[in-house]
Amino acid sequence: MTRFIYDQFAKDYLEELLSQFGECQTPLEIRSEIRQVDVFFAPYLQHKAHQKY
């Protein structure tokens, strides 16, 4: 359940934006102690290798 009106919008927006660059899950439950993360992002390693600075 969301606390604010814009909370679900922000989660959906971040998931759409970040999914192009890595794995993104909203929400994600962590089992060590039952906790919930609003947005989990793990970047793809292949994108980092192709970037030029």
Image: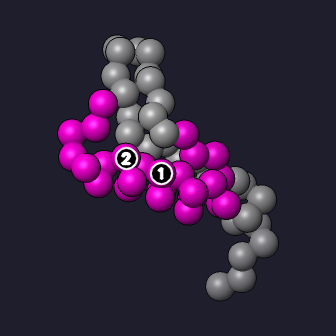
Taking the spot 57% from the left edge, 57% from the top edge, the residue there is 16
- The answer to whether the residues at label 1 and label 2 have Cβ atoms under 8 Å apart is yes
Q: Is residue 18 left or right of residue 2?
A: right
Give the answer, above or below, for where 40 lies relative to 29. below
Taking the spot 69% from the left edge, 53% from the top edge, the residue there is 44
Kind of residue at disc 2: Gln
Q: Is residue 13 magenta?
A: yes
Taking the spot 72% from the left edge, 55% from the top edge, the residue there is 45
Taking the spot 34% from the left edge, 22% from the top edge, the residue there is 35
Residue at image mark 1: 12
Q: In the structure shown, which secondary structural element does the residue marked by tag 2 occupy?
A: helix
Q: In the structure shown, which secondary structural element does the residue marked by tag 1 occupy?
A: helix
When asked about the image quadrant of residue 19, the answer is: bottom right
Q: Find the distance from the CA under tag 1 to the CA under tag 2.
A: 6 Å
Q: Is residue 12 magenta?
A: yes
Residue at image mark 2: 8
Q: Closer to the camera, 37 or 53?
A: 37
The x, y position of residue 10, in whole percent, is: 38, 55
Q: Closer to the camera, 18 or 7?
A: 7
Q: Is residue 49 left or right of residue 13?
A: right
Q: Is residue 4 left or right of residue 7?
A: left
The residue sitting at the bottom extreme is 53
The x, y position of residue 46, in whole percent, is: 77, 59
Which portion, as a residue range, is magenta?
A: 1-25
Classify the position of the N terminus by image quarter.
top left
